[in-house]
Amino acid sequence: MSFMDTLKAQRHNVRDYGMYIAFVAIVVFFTVATKGLFLTSRNIGNLVNATSYIAVLAVGMTLVIVIRHIDLSVGYLAGTLGAVAAISLKYWGVPVVPTILMVLALGIVAGLVTGFLVAQMRIPAFVATLAGWLFYQGLLQWVTRGTGTIVIDNEIFNALGNGFIPDIDIGILPDVHKITLLLGLLAIVAFVVSEVTNRRKTMSYHFEVLPMNMFILKLAFVSAVIAGVSWIFAGYQGLSWAAVILIFVVLIYSYITTKTVVGRHIYAVGGNPESAQLNGISVKKITFLVFGSMGLLTAVSGILYSSWLRSATTIAGRGMELDAIAAAFVGGAAVAGGVGKVTGSILGALVMASLTNGMNLMGADISVQYMVRAFVLAGAVIFDVATRKATD
Amino acid sequence: MRSIKKTFAAVQALKGVDLVLHRGEVLGLVGDNAAGKSTLMKVLSGAYIPDEGEILIEGENAHLTDPLHARRLGIEMVYQDLALANNLDITANVFLGREAVSAKLGPFSIMDSRRMEQEAQRLLERLKIDIPSVRQLVERLSGGQRQAVAIARATAFDSKVIIMDEPTAALSVAAISKVLDLVRELKAQGASIIIISHRLEDIYSVSDRLMVMRQGRKVRDARITESIDDFRERVVAYMIGARDDFASIEAG
């Protein structure tokens, strides 16, 4: 097979690659339009911090959408959990670590309650979580009614949303963040090693693999992207804690969804619930699990958000659920269920955040921003539907 | 299966049906709508628990509690709507609910993807199913190929009895002959098969024996020896109630 044939054979993957290409196009456009301001280390660092709490929600939301449900309650739940963290730190005097563990546990409980309503009581998720949306909005106002906005003065907690990983002084490269570069390098090595061993194992089973030239191209491309991103981060204050948390969430969730039995079962339930049930997969159990995980990630999101703001406000989390849903759909999740990747939802969140950030830098009016994002959301779904049809 | 009875509310769906299936035999099961054939098969595949009667597998009494239990005992059902997950690939569908596990990581079982792919590939080869890659998503397959995958799944785990509910409905002529070839191939490899179909010529071409049901009873159970024309005429006579081999026995 010639190189061009191989490229052509990859055509049916256009759906997967389309998003990456669109993202690169957006980045290039804003970089040019803002005369380089968009791609500065400082801006990208801020952009990632301001996206992380949506991106984390989008990961959980994607799985909810995969099993054909929706969760409208997560915005105010995140706000409420953030307020609980603030109250715990400020008024109860609970240290950071127990506070975080408690909030994560509360998130899981809240998620399981939603799961109970959907899986056990058989209330449509839209209705159940609309009730949750009302409830947590009320709960948030109730817990903050005496205090109003709660300012968080715990520096460790605030570092999660604002801080950066430490660096070492080795005498060279004084203006760049050495640890960030080192981590980038380690990531490249880990990626290449895992791809090469994976390829070898697959070949030993006599299964098809990418041709050598394509494989090398892929390795080179991904390595270059990791190197580039590391370099950008290293140019300001290095990798932020929020970015580290986001990377952890993505790695763990990608692994679970693609490599484990329960991940496979989540997609099976989304693709055909009757079939899953007939094959011994408990749809109920998977529903509980997915909403539980949504609750956990909502807690992470609430922590990141309140930490980023250094405070818990009475309207924290408003509209976050819709941003997360938009990110999931831009990232390739399908309303019909069964389709949607963790990496896609992160990319979707980055696309939407880049639009806002880029247009802000360009001084675009807020009204225009909303409309542009509307077109991107609709366009992404149209593209998705069209490519799906074409490959049928 | 011995004198199986099943009643739904006021409707007696099965009025004491006997069914014997020998090893390596293909049994055709026909009957008009609501004759009780699907109910009987759901009893055999564990989806329904009968009110009366017993199921013997190799002489041993089996109290089937659910489809999974039946499957563990080697009874597999190929459902008419196939019960495939279209968003997953062939391998994932073949191993759905029975994934091969390479390691455990806390609460998570890590799948052995390569082993599953390899076994799925071997399975397709063994059954002479012509699909280039087990990594194909099921949504990209034709109707006949989907049927083949559903049947392959039913045979993947040393099944003793394979029940096929209308395997040739809604298929093109070319696809039908491939599915029937697959049934013959399975029989040649020693599987026992029950095939439900409205297409009498399909039943005729692959079955050793025919059973006709009418209004919750068995009205005919005999080896197929006649010509296709006689066969068709006779089956219709049993289906509409003009003939009944068991009427006198039960009355007496």
Image (cartoon, rainbow, N blue to C red):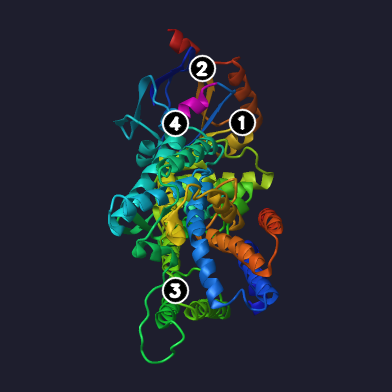
- Marker disc for residue B245: 2
Tell me what residue is drawn at x 39 percent, y 80 percent. A179
Residues packed near mark 1 inside 10 Å, few (<14), some (14 to 19) or many (20 plus) = some
Q: Position of residue B101 (x, y in %)?
A: 35, 57
Residues packed near mark 2 inside 10 Å, few (<14), some (14 to 19) or many (20 plus) = few
What is the count of numbered marks? 4
- The subunit letter for the residue under badge 2 reads B
- Whether residue B95 is visible here, answered yes or no, is no
> Compared with residue B33, is residue B248 higher up or lower down, i.e. above or below?
above
Task: Please tell me whether the stretch drawn in magenta is mainly helix, strand or loop.
Answer: helix
The boundaries of the magenta stretch are B35-42
Which amino acid type corresponds to the residue marked 2 in the rendered image? Asp
- Marker disc for residue B198: 1
Choose mark 3 or mark 4, whichever is in front. Answer: 3
Q: Are marks 3 and 4 on the same chain?
A: yes
Which circle's residue, 3 or 4, is located before the other in the chain? 4
Left or right, A5 with respect to B151, comes to: right
Q: Closer to the camera, A350 or A12? A: A350
The residue where tag 3 is placed is A239
- Marker disc for residue A121: 4
